[in-house]
Image (spheres, rainbow, N blue to C red):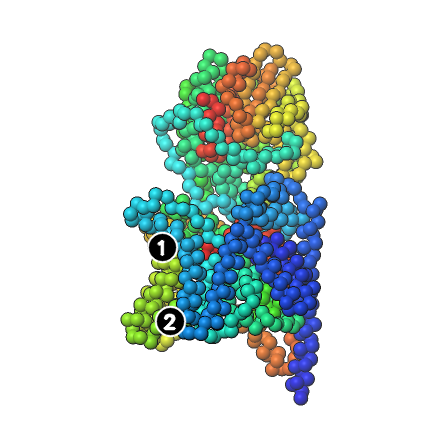
C-alpha cells in the first residue's frame, strides 16, 4: 500500500518536471522560430569575419529542381541569423574551454613550404600571358565605402598568448612569377624609370627565434628573401629591410593581433628606401601623429582566440607633410576624394588598419602641391604597402598606388602613360606566395 | 535538409510541431507528418521525390498483389518483382558509376563514365520498403491497403534519409493509432537534444580536428602521432555523427508517439568484433541477418555454407556503405575477423579478462575506420605505412602537440560521451531513490535542465557553422 502511494506520488512529481522540461524545449524552439522570422534583425555583414553574409537566394527553376535553391536558403538562414555575431562570440567563449589554449596553430594542416633554392631563379616563369585571371577576391568584395582591408592571410597562424604570428610557407612557383614580374617591369621601363623591390617579411621571421620558426613549420624567411633578390635583374634596385627590422625588433614594428606591420615598421623601411634612392628621409618627429586605439586585427578574426580580443592595440599613423588628400578609384569604379590618413576612431575594432590610404583599392593617386618636378612614383602593393605609402608622398609630385589584386590593366602601360620615374614593389612575402594571385600579377606586365 | 541545421531546428521542426498539435484526429496528424516529410525530402532536390514516391508506390502495389495472390508461386513472383524493382533502382543510382569505372579500367569501355547523382537516403528507404514487402510475403505483417500510409512509413522525415532502417512491423500499429504521454514527450525531447548536441557540438568538432590532422595532399609529411590522433578523432566523429542522427530520429518519433528500435548500443565498449556488430548500426546488421544471411541458410548447412553466407553478407554490407572498393574491403576486413572469432578466437576471448577482448576489438574497429576513410587506395597505403613509420617521419610535431593541448578537455568529454557512463549513473541513481522510496528531486531537476542547455549549446555551435558535413549522405 505504501509502495503504491509512493509510486503514485512519484508519477505526479515526475510529471511536473517532465512538463517543465518539454516546456523549456518547445519554448526555446518557438522563441528561435520567431526571432528567425524577424527579417529586419538579420545582419547583412559580419564585422568579425569581414565579409558580406549570404544573401537570400535568387529563385530560378533550375536552382529549384537541382536543390541548390533550398540549399542556399539553408545557408542564408544560418548565415544571417539575428544576433549572429553575439552568438558566435559566446560560442568562441565556450570553445576556449575545450582545452589549454595559450598556444595554438590555426589553419596549418601539415603545410610545408617548398624548398628554397640556394642559387638564383633558373626557370623563367610562363611567358604566355594568362588569359583567364581567377578573381578569387571577388567574393570578399565590399560595398562599403573605402574602409576595409581584406584579410590576406595565405599561411597559417601561430598564437602564443596575446601575440599571434603568421607562419610563412615559401612557394617556388609563386616566387618565380613575382620575380619575373619585377624583371619584366624593369626591362620594360629601362631608361624611363627605376624599379625598386622591397620584400617585407612576416612578423614571425623577425620576432620569433629561428628554432621556434622551425618548430611551427615555417620556411626560412631570410633565405626566401635572399632568393628573391638574387634572382632579380641588375637593373632592379633592392631595398633590403630584413636586418633593419630585425634591429628594431624590440619596438612595436608589427601588430600582435593583426598580420600587418605598424607605421613604425613601415617608417624604418622607408628610411632604407631613402638610402637606396639617395634622398634624405624625414624624421618621424616631423610628422603629425594620429592614434587609433582599440584595434583588434585579422589574427583575431581568423582564430577567434580570446587572448587576442582581450588585448586590443593602437594603430599609429603619420600624416604626410605636404598633403593629406588623395583620389581613390574603388572596385566599383566609383571615385572618391579621401584622406591619406583617415580618422578611423569610429570604425569597427577590426577595421582600423584602413586608416592608411583608404584601405585596399585598385587604383589611387596622390598629387603633391609642393612639387612640380615631374617626379612620379608607382607603388605596386597589397595591404602591407598601405602603411608605407604615406611616407612617399612628400618625395614625389605624384604617387600612383595600385593594389594588384584588384587592378585589371597593364602595369607597364600605366607607368608609360603617366611618365612614371620610380616603380616600387612593396610586398609582403606571405601575401605574394599565392600562385593564383601571382599569375594575375604576372599577366599585368606582359 | 539535415537535422543539424538552424533552418530545420527553428523553422521546419517548429512548424511541423505546431501543425501536428493542431491536427485533431490521427488521420490529420498522419497527413501533417506526410506533407512535412515530403517537403523535407524535396529540400535536397525535388526531382528525387519522384523516385521516392514511385518506389513506394511499386512496393505498395506488389505488397497488395502478394496479399491477394492465391498461390505460393504468385506471391513469390510479386515478391521477386519488388526485389527486382527496388534493387535495380538502388543499383542504378548507386553503383552504375562504380561498375562502369571498373569496366573502363579493365576493358577501356565505355569512354566516358556518366556522373549519376545519388538521391538522398535511397540506401535507407529502399531497404525499408524491401523489408516491408518481404515481411508481407512471409506473412509476418499485415498488408497496408492505403498507399499514402506506405508512403508515410517510408518517407517519414525522422528516419527517411539517415536511418535507422525502421521495419514496417515496428510502426504498423502506431501508424494506425498512437498516443503520447508527458513522459513520452519528455523522453523524446531528451533524446533529441542529446542527439543534436552529439552532432552539432561533438561530432562536428571531431570532424574538423580529424580534417586538420589528415589532409589528403599532406599525408606524406604528417607526423606519426598526427595520423594516429587524426584517425582517433575520425573514429569518434563517425560514431557520434551517425548515432546522433539515430538519437534525433528516435527522439522525434517518441515525441509524436512512435517507438523506433535502438540503432546503436555503445559499440565502442564491445569486447569482440561479433559483439561490436551487435551494437553498431543494429538496424542494418539485423536487416542483412533476416533478409540475406538466414534465407541463404545461415549457419545451418555446414561450415562451408556458413562461411560462404558470411562472405556474401559482409561483401554486401561493405558495398552498401559506398560504391568504392575501400568499403568492400572494409566489409571483408570484418568478415575475416568474424571468421577467426568463429573458428577459435571467440572461445579464447570468453576465457580471458574482458579488457583484452576490448583492446583487440577497438584496434580492429580503429583500423577498420582507416580503411573506411580513404576511397583512394594510394592514400590508404600512405597513411597505414605512415602510422608505423618510426624512422622516416617526425614522431610528433608542434601542431599535433598544440592540438592535443588545445582540445584536451573536449577529447575527454567526447570519450565519455561514447561510453554508457552517464546512462549507468542515471539508472543507479533512480534505482537507489526507488529503493529508498524517495523522489530524486535533484536528478529530476538535472534531467529537466540538461536538454535545454544542450539545445542552446547546439544552436550556438550551429550559428555560422559553415562546417557541417553530413557523413551518411553518401550511403
Residue nearest the viewer, comparing A175 with A105: A175
Q: Position of residue B137 (x, y in %)?
A: 45, 71
Q: Residue at x 68, y 61 (%)?
A: B18
Say what secondary structure mark 2 lies in. Answer: loop
Q: Are marks 1 and 2 on the same chain?
A: yes
Vertical order, B182 against A79 (above or below): below
1 vs 2, front mark? 2
Q: Position of residue B62 (x, y in %)?
A: 47, 66
Q: Residue at x 58, y 32 (%)?
A: A262
The quadrant holding residue A220 is top left
Between the residue at mark 1 and the residue at mark 2, the CA separation in whole angstroms equals 26 Å
| Residue at image mark 1 | B325
Residue nearest the viewer, comparing B275 with B406: B275
Q: Residue at x 44, y 27 (%)?
A: A130
Tell me if residue B101 can be seen.
yes
Q: Quadrant of the C terminus of chain A?
A: top left
Residue nearest the viewer, comparing B183 with A67: A67
Q: Quadrant of the N terminus of chain A?
A: bottom right
Vertical order, B437 against A146 (above or below): below
Vertical order, A391 against B325 (above or below): above
Say what secondary structure mark 1 lies in. Answer: helix
Left or right: where A436 falls relative to A391: left
Which sits earlier in the primary sequence, circle 1 or circle 2? 2
Circle count: 2
Amino acid at each position: 500500500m505504501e509502495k503504491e502511494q509512493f509510486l503514485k506520488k512519484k508519477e505526479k512529481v515526475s510529471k511536473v518536471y517532465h512538463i517543465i522540461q518539454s516546456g523549456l524545449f518547445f519554448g526555446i524552439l518557438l522563441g528561435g522560430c520567431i526571432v528567425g522570422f524577424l527579417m529586419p534583425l538579420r545582419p547583412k555583414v559580419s564585422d568579425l569575419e569581414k565579409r558580406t553574409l549570404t544573401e537570400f537566394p535568387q529563385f530560378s527553376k533550375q536552382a529549384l529542381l537541382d536543390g541548390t535553391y533550398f540549399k542556399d536558403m539553408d545557408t542564408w538562414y544560418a548565415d544571417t541569423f539575428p544576433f549572429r555575431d553575439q552568438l558566435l562570440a559566446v560560442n568562441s567563449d565556450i570553445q576556449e574551454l575545450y582545452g589549454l589554449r595559450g598556444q595554438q596553430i590555426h589553419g596549418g594542416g601539415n603545410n610545408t613550404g617548398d624548398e628554397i633554392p640556394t642559387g638564383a631563379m633558373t626557370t623563367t616563369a610562363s611567358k604566355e600571358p594568362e588569359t583567364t585571371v581567377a578573381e578569387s577576391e571577388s567574393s570578399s568584395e565590399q560595398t562599403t565605402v573605402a574602409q576595409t582591408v581584406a584579410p590576406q592571410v595565405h599561411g597559417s597562424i601561430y598564437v602564443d598568448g596575446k601575440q599571434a604570428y603568421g607562419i610563412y610557407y615559401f612557394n617556388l612557383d609563386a616566387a618565380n612569377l613575382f620575380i619575373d614580374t619585377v624583371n619584366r617591369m624593369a626591362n620594360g621601363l629601362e631608361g624611363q624609370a627605376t624599379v625598386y623591390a622591397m620584400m617585407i617579411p612576416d612578423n614571425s621571421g623577425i620576432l620569433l627565434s629561428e628554432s621556434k620558426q622551425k618548430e611551427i613549420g615555417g620556411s626560412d624567411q631570410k633565405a626566401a628573401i635572399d632568393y628573391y633578390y638574387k634572382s632579380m635583374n641588375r637593373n632592379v634596385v633592392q631595398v633590403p629591410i630584413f636586418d633593419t627590422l630585425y634591429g628594431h625588433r624590440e619596438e612595436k614594428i608589427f601588430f600582435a593581433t593583426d598580420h600587418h606591420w605598424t607605421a613604425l615598421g613601415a617608417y624604418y623601411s622607408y628610411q632604407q628606401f631613402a638610402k637606396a634612392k639617395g634622398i634624405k628621409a624625414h624624421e618621424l618627429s616631423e610628422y603629425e601623429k594620429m592614434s587609433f586605439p582599440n584595434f583588434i586585427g585579422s589574427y583575431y578574426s581568423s582564430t577567434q582566440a580570446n587572448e587576442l580580443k582581450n588585448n586590443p592595440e593602437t594603430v599609429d599613423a603619420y600624416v604626410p607633410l605636404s598633403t593629406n588628400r588623395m583620389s581613390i578609384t574603388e572596385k566599383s569604379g566609383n571615385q572618391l576624394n579621401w584622406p591619406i590618413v583617415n580618422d578611423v576612431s569610429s570604425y569597427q575594432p577590426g577595421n582600423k588598419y584602413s586608416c592608411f590610404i583608404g584601405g585596399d583599392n585598385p587604383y589611387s593617386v596622390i598629387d603633391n602641391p609642393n612639387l612640380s618636378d615631374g617626379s612620379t612614383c608607382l607603388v605596386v602593393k597589397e595591404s602591407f604597402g598601405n602603411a608605407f605609402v604615406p611616407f612617399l608622398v612628400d618625395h614625389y609630385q605624384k604617387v600612383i598606388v595600385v593594389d594588384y589584386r584588384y587592378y585589371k590593366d597593364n602595369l607597364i602601360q600605366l607607368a608609360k602613360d603617366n611618365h612614371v620615374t620610380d616603380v616600387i614593389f612593396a610586398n609582403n612575402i606571405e601575401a605574394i606566395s599565392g600562385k593564383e594571385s601571382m599569375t594575375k600579377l604576372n599577366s599585368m606586365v606582359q | 535538409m539535415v537535422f543539424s541545421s538552424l533552418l530545420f531546428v527553428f523553422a521546419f521542426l517548429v512548424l511541423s510541431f505546431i501543425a501536428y498539435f493542431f491536427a485533431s484526429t490521427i488521420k490529420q496528424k498522419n497527413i501533417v507528418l506526410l506533407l512535412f516529410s515530403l517537403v523535407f525530402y524535396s529540400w535536397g532536390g525535388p526531382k528525387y521525390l519522384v523516385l521516392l514516391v514511385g518506389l513506394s508506390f511499386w512496393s505498395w502495389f506488389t505488397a497488395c498483389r502478394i496479399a491477394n495472390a492465391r498461390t505460393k508461386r504468385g506471391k513469390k513472383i510479386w515478391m521477386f518483382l519488388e526485389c527486382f524493382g527496388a534493387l535495380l533502382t538502388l543499383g542504378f543510382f548507386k553503383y552504375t558509376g562504380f561498375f562502369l569505372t571498373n569496366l573502363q579500367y579493365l576493358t577501356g569501355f565505355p569512354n566516358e563514365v556518366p556522373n549519376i547523382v545519388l538521391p538522398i537516403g535511397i540506401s535507407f528507404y529502399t531497404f525499408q520498403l524491401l523489408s516491408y514487402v518481404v515481411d508481407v510475403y512471409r506473412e509476418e505483417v499485415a498488408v497496408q491497403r492505403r498507399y499514402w500510409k506506405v508512403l508515410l512509413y517510408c518517407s517519414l522525415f525522422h528516419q527517411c534519409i539517415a536511418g535507422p532502417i525502421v521495419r514496417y512491423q515496428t510502426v504498423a500499429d502506431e501508424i494506425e493509432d498512437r498516443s503520447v504521454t508527458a513522459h513520452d514527450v519528455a523522453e523524446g525531447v531528451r533524446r533529441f537534444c542529446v542527439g543534436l548536441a552529439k552532432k552539432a557540438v561533438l561530432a562536428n568538432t571531431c570532424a574538423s580536428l580529424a580534417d586538420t590532422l589528415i589532409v589528403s595532399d599532406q599525408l606524406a609529411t604528417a607526423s606519426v602521432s598526427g595520423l594516429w590522433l587524426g584517425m582517433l578523432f575520425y573514429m569518434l566523429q563517425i560514431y557520434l555523427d551517425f548515432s546522433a542522427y539515430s538519437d534525433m530520429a528516435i527522439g522525434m518519433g517518441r515525441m509524436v508517439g512512435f517507438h523506433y528500435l535502438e540503432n546503436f548500443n555503445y559499440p565502442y565498449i564491445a569486447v569482440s568484433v561479433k559483439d561490436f556488430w551487435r551494437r553498431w548500426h543494429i538496424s542494418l546488421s539485423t536487416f542483412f541477418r533476416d533478409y540475406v544471411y538466414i534465407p541463404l541458410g545461415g549457419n545451418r548447412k555446414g561450415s562451408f555454407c556458413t562461411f560462404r553466407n558470411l562472405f556474401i553478407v559482409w561483401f554486401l554490407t561493405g558495398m552498401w556503405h559506398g560504391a568504392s572498393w575501400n568499403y568492400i574491403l572494409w566489409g571483408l576486413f570484418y568478415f575475416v575477423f568474424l571468421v577467426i572469432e568463429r573458428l577459435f578466437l571467440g572461445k579464447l576471448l570468453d576465457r580471458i579478462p574482458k579488457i583484452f577482448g576490448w583492446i583487440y576489438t577497438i584496434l580492429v574497429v580503429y583500423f577498420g575506420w582507416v580503411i573506411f576513410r580513404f576511397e583512394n587506395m594510394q592514400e590508404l597505403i600512405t597513411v597505414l605505412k605512415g602510422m608505423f613509420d618510426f624512422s622516416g617521419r617526425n614522431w610528433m610535431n608542434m601542431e599535433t602537440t598544440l592540438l592535443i593541448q588545445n582540445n584536451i578537455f573536449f577529447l575527454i568529454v567526447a570519450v565519455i560521451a561514447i561510453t554508457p557512463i552517464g546512462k549507468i549513473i542515471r539508472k543507479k541513481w533512480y534505482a537507489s531513490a526507488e529503493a529508498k522510496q524517495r523522489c530524486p528531486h535533484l536528478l529530476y531537476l538535472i534531467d529537466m535542465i540538461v536538454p535545454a542547455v544542450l539545445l542552446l549549446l547546439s544552436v550556438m555551435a550551429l550559428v555560422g557553422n559553415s562546417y557541417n558535413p553530413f557523413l551518411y549522405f553518401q550511403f
